Amino acid sequence: MLVTGKAILHHAHENEYAVGAFNVNNMEQVQAIIEAAEETKSPVIIQASQGGLQYAGVEYIAQMAKVAAEKASVPVAIHLDHGTDFKQIMLCIRNGFTSVMIDGSHYELEENIRKTKQIVEMAHAVGVSVEAELGKIGGTEDDISVDEKDATYTDPDEAEKFVAETGIDSLAIAVGTAHGPYKGEPKLDFDRIKIIKERLNMPIVLHGSSGVPEESIKKAVSLGINKINIDTDIRMVFHKAVKEFIASNPDTYDPRKIVGPARKAMKEVIAEKMNMFGSSDKAWK
Ligand code: 13P
């Protein structure tokens, strides 16, 4: 069942849980996400970043995700992760994405507001939901890199102004996570999550969630996080499964045999995440 990002996140906000948003580049990842969502009866978000769209093409990602969503018994949204370009956002919407992110976090507040508002007006006119970002999340997500020293936490006062002036549906906040693998253990600013949730009373989003310990994720969800972005953990599971298969079957050349076990391994990890985020058994008809 294909639905908007807003429908999914509104339900999560009202019922106090988080939905997994998993990045995809290929068919096996799309299938792994849907299998896990159906098995755990979770609503889910399939998302593509700049790199994913460059690798597979907007049309391929959109069509694969649409087939998966329409066949699925659970609610599924198709989301553009870290959109930066007006034209690309338009193209994603035209191809059937039901949610887009405009990432203006590298601009000054007023410019971020201006750019975000423009996308909100256009996307809402055709029933597509919008996520935006305030504060700067560290690390690397494909083409977008923020040096650790340039990462800045989301300011609750600015967040209130930002939401009021842009009309976004969800806000990605910077509270200590970073995209990509962590060197040490990430320390989340839980007080900030709590304050921002109380002030905004709307869906809030955690990026850079791979490698964050289970208890921190659960605490973040209990304080109001409703969307949890996962990319690196799934890439790593894929890599491990393919590597192990090739090591023990060096002469097998059938791509289905090489990538099939990775699809299964990804599905298992995604299902575990869904249980951790509290989205299991939350799918609605
Ligand atoms: P990770 O790669 O750290 O899981 O982050 C994913 C993300 O936030 C995508 O926007």
Image (cartoon, rainbow, N blue to C red):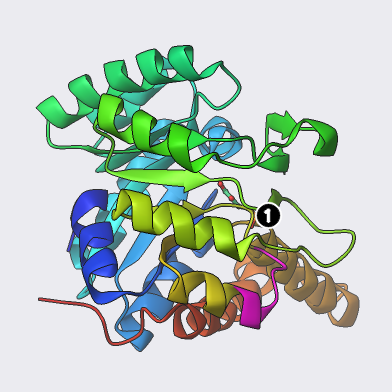
Q: Is residue 147 magenta?
A: no
Query: Is 213 covered by the magenta stretch?
Result: yes
Q: Which residues are magenta?
A: 210-216
| Residue 110 in sight from this viewpoint | yes
Relative to 252, residue 138 above or below: above
Residue 233 on image: x %, y %: 68, 66
Indicate the amino acid at tag 1: Thr
Q: Nearer the viewer, residue 197 or 173?
A: 197
Residue nearest the viewer, comparing 126 with 96: 126
Instruction: Find residue 164 and report its image quarter.
Output: top left
Which percent across, then down, holds residue 109?
Answer: 50, 19
**Residue at 35%, 85% in the rendered image:** 280
User: Residue placed at 74% from the left, 75% from the top?
Assistant: 241
- Quadrant of the snapshot with the N terminus: bottom left
Residue 191 occupies quadrant: bottom right
Q: Judge: label 1 CB < 8 Å from ligand 1.
A: yes
| Residue 254 position (above or below residue 139) | below
**Identity of the residue drawn at 28% across and 24% down:** 165
Callout 1 environment at 10 Å: few (<14), some (14 to 19), or many (20+)?
many
On the picture, is 142 further left or further right than 56?
Answer: right
Q: Is residue 254 visible?
A: no
- Residue occupied by mark 1: 177
- In the picture shown, does residue 24 fall above or below 123? below
Q: 78 and 108: which one is in front?
A: 108
Q: Is residue 100 shown left or right of residue 95? A: right
Q: Residue at x 77, y 30 (%)?
A: 150
Query: Residue 97, position in %: x, y?
Result: 28, 40
Per the image, label 1 sits on a secondary structure element best described as: loop
